[in-house]
Image (cartoon, rainbow, N blue to C red):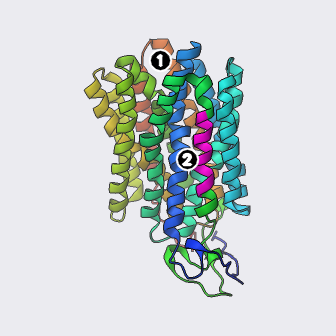
Amino acid sequence: MSETVVSTTVSDVAVTRGPFGPSARFPGAWVLAAAFTLLTFSSGVGFYGLSVYLQAFSRELGWSVASISSATTVFFLVGGISAVTVAKFVAKYDVRLVVLVGAVLGSGSLFCMQFVTQRWHLFAVYTVYALGWVASGVGPVTTVVTRWFNAKRTSALAIASTGLSMGGIVVTPIIKSILDTQGIERGSPWLAVIWFVGIVPVTVLFLRPYPHLLGWTPDGGRMQVGSTPQVTGTSLAVAVRTKFFWMIAVGYIFAFSAQVGAVQQLVKMVEERTDRTTATLGTVVLSVFSILARFAASRALTRLDMVKFTVLIALTQGLSLAFIGVMNSSFGLLVGIAFFGMTIGNMLMMQSLLLAQRFGVRDYPQITARQGLISFTGTAAGPILLGTLHDFAGGYRSSYLAAGACSLVGALLFWRAGSANAPAGEHQ
């Protein structure tokens, strides 16, 4: 069954000032800058921040790791389920409206962290926080990037997703310092401010949903008034019936379970074995090597098979997590974290690239959302799995060895997916 081609007619090009004006150069760089910034704060306060919050709640309220990890599990489950609805809004409305709603929900939930005194309070706050995180995070941002870039999509996604790692380098140490020195009660309002200020201005000023609305084609070609841009790709109904879709989706259940579980427990694990300074350094090392590896991959992927490269990433992730599991010295842990960091950004980036390569742009938001709904079950299971194993065994060795094993299962499933290139007739 072949795909449908969706087209719209550009009858008029909006006249705007600044970088988006009719006489300006291709504004893709501004859109990329906005995407980079959004992912910086989404990951720094959101994804990586969850590991900081886990340690803060455990330290201040004396709750077990498993009980706090279960709230993180709910966070990712709500995120996975709500991503489907968010994708529909992104496809139908201006993406800026979706991101701004996420900014309000996220900042409001972070502000309310100061009132958490019982476990159910944390579950309620994390539920709202998950909605804000999904609405202003990876799904909407990567959708915009895939719309603006085609031939340059790999390098564009690499640049945008580098914000995920930059958040761990720049933003996460700041919020950790705030919570370490001021505690949750006095520190959470500052987290809300950081989230809001980091997301709202750049969204309003520089994020734009489609290039053709400003008179451009993807990658920087000029459109003529009255021309018809064609958005091609495989339909969602066809995509979800392919072996490729399911092998990638289930593979990411195991890969994300290992990765997210390991990241969320990282700060506490390193502090238990060493000290707070090493734990902070560990988050920086993780992010730095994630950036370096992602840019190396963006150059190499023009010559590599995407599926085989994803298999290699999953294998490296599994071995590095097992290495972390058996290390107790600061140096050994940082070495293991460096190798683990090399897989983090690329693992997430490859999911977007694999889906865009195989299924095109047409139903990309809905396809990635369905993938997310499936793979987020692994994302949600990871923190509670590692947290429960920690409490049961009295340490993190078994937790990280289990995460390593999950990564190897993911590598096997990726290998079974087949080629990322669409068969003749499926993708026109």
Residue 194 part of the magenta segment: yes
Comparing 155 with 20, the one in front is 20
In the depicted structure, whether residue 129 falls above or below residue 371: above
Picture coordinates of residue 183, whole percent (x, y): 55, 22
Picture coordinates of residue 343, whole percent (x, y): 38, 44
Q: Nearer the viewer, mark 1 or mark 2?
A: 1
- For the image, the number of numbered tags is 2
User: What whole-number distance in Å separates the C-alpha atoms at marks 1 and 2?
Assistant: 27 Å
- Which stretch appears magenta? 190-202
The secondary structure type at the circle numbered 1 is helix
On the image, numbered disc 1 is attached to which residue?
A: 390
Q: Main secondary structure of the magenta part?
A: helix
On the image, numbered disc 2 is attached to which residue?
A: 249
Q: Is residue 250 visible?
A: no
| Residue located at (32% from left, 22% from top) | 326
Picture coordinates of residue 179, whole percent (x, y): 52, 26
State which quarter of the image contains the N terminus.
Answer: bottom right
